[in-house]
Amino acid sequence: MAIAYIIGLGRSGIAAAKLLKREGWDVILSDRADSPNLYPTQQKLADEGISVKLGHTPILTSDNLPNLIVVSPGVPWDIPLLVEARDLGIDTIGELELAWRYLNSSPWVAITGTNGKTTTTALVSAMFQGAKLNAPACGNIGYAACELALSQQKKDNAQPYDFIIAEISSYQIESSQKIAPKICIWTTFTPDHLSRHKTLDNYYSIKSSLLHRCRHQIFNGDDPYLRQVGLEQWPDAYWTSVKGKDNLLCDPAKGVYLQDNWVVAFGELIIPINLFKMVGSHNQQNLLMAVAAARLAGIEKTAIAQAIATFTGVPHRLELICNVQGIDFINDSKATNYDAAEVGLKSVESPVILIAGGEAKEGDDTRWLEEIKAKAATVLLIGDAAPTFAKRLKECNYNNYEIVKTMDKAVKKGLELGQQYQAKTVLLSPACASFDQYQSFEHRGDDFRDLCQKL
């Protein structure tokens, strides 16, 4: 019997293990973590014939090598185990690549980029489903991709999905070198994940490898980096711009843009932009890219217009939680780097009480700090990054900050200071990863939501 190692006991790892077990593989799932809350999952999978080893990293021995290794997105692609496996010729892939092997009879729409992926993916999904297509979202939103493959296998005489809508991170691209979507969107490109990818050039090459494998490429024509490399590297791409057709890097017949407050796609009026409820020009840009994908897929403009008019946004990205005593409490937990947090600040009314901090990332904080100085009445700092952020704020002559450490204290203090400064908004936009205090940015955002609602 063929042997498969699955590394990572998350949602994607579990789905990959179940898929391979159903296909007749001998599956061993391992995770470095070993905590009591994982034991019920370990037992449940054992009951299905899947061996789960906690507190464990596989070792390759010549007498019992696996035929396949599948890694979850959070597992670095260059750890010694995976490098050795590839050197030995062992089939080593990511969970998304495994799903592709079972789902490539359906066309894929892939969305990648530093920021804006989740909102754009949700918009694409809304438009495709509004057209009555069976087009589930997966990857970093919705299902793990292997869950879709499992679901399709369970049905007798199952038809292929009309489309697969996949939000794909650089981690997933790196370990999925055969995925070839029909349509691919690149939302933005700024420095991120450099602790893993080392250089900006390497990060770019990973992202661009996915675009090179797809039939139709859609780019954000207002992103400075993508615009700089645009015509030379992507001469046949479709481009979008919120600044009108004169700002396009392509013939307007291949562009989607705003003109006279209308969304125009490939020369056709789609919908007045004022019917789109999300705030910020960055979200209008996300909308244009989603419209481009929908039109390339042949979706009628009536279905697109209906989806736009009813779309209210996604959790954790500029999500209005509640209004307390005239102050909007907004959850932007998805803003896990400086660029996303800068966009969050630009999108809300000032004066702002900003909650920031967590597990710091590498990157250029200059524009974020300038936006804080322009719009924030005060900054409440949480998590491991709080002392570092305090130092950076002081260095740029911004002294109205306080280290409060925890989200609970930040939310309570936010209401108090919001009243004092007559603030319009208390904004959680951390500019950090969440793993110092939370399991994920979703977990952090959910905690913020619960605390706000208790107010």
Image (cartoon, grey):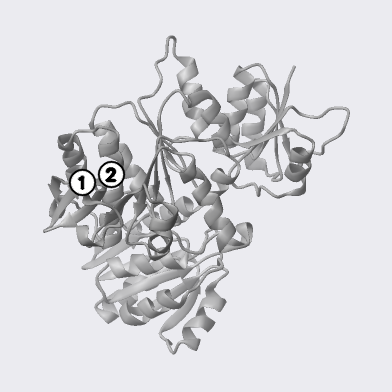
Is residue 244 visible in the rendered image? The answer is: no
- Would you identify the image quadrant in which residue 311 lies? top left
> Which secondary structure lies at badge 1?
strand
* Crowdedness near tag 2: few (<14), some (14–19) or many (≥20) residues, C-alpha within 10 Å: many
For label 1, the residue is: 265
* Left or right: 378, with 75 as reference point: left
- The furthest residue to the top: 157
> Which secondary structure lies at badge 2?
helix
Nearest the camera: 310 or 178?
Answer: 178
Quadrant housing the C terminus? bottom left
- Residue 121 x/y as whole percent: 36, 44
| For the residues bearing labels 2 and 1, Cβ distance under 8 angstroms | yes
- Residue 307 x/y as whole percent: 21, 40
- Would you identify the image quadrant in which residue 18 lies? top right
Is residue 131 visible in the rendered image? The answer is: yes
Q: Amino acid at mark 1?
A: Ala
Q: CA distance from mark 2 to mark 1?
A: 7 Å
Q: Who comes first in sequence, dot 2 or dot 1? A: 1
Q: Say if 416 sits above or below 128 in the image.
A: below
The disc placed on residue 292 is 2
* Residue that appears at 43% across and 87% down: 399
Q: Amino acid at mark 2?
A: Ala
* Left or right: 48, with 391 as reference point: right
Q: Say if 317 sits above or below 294 in the image.
A: below
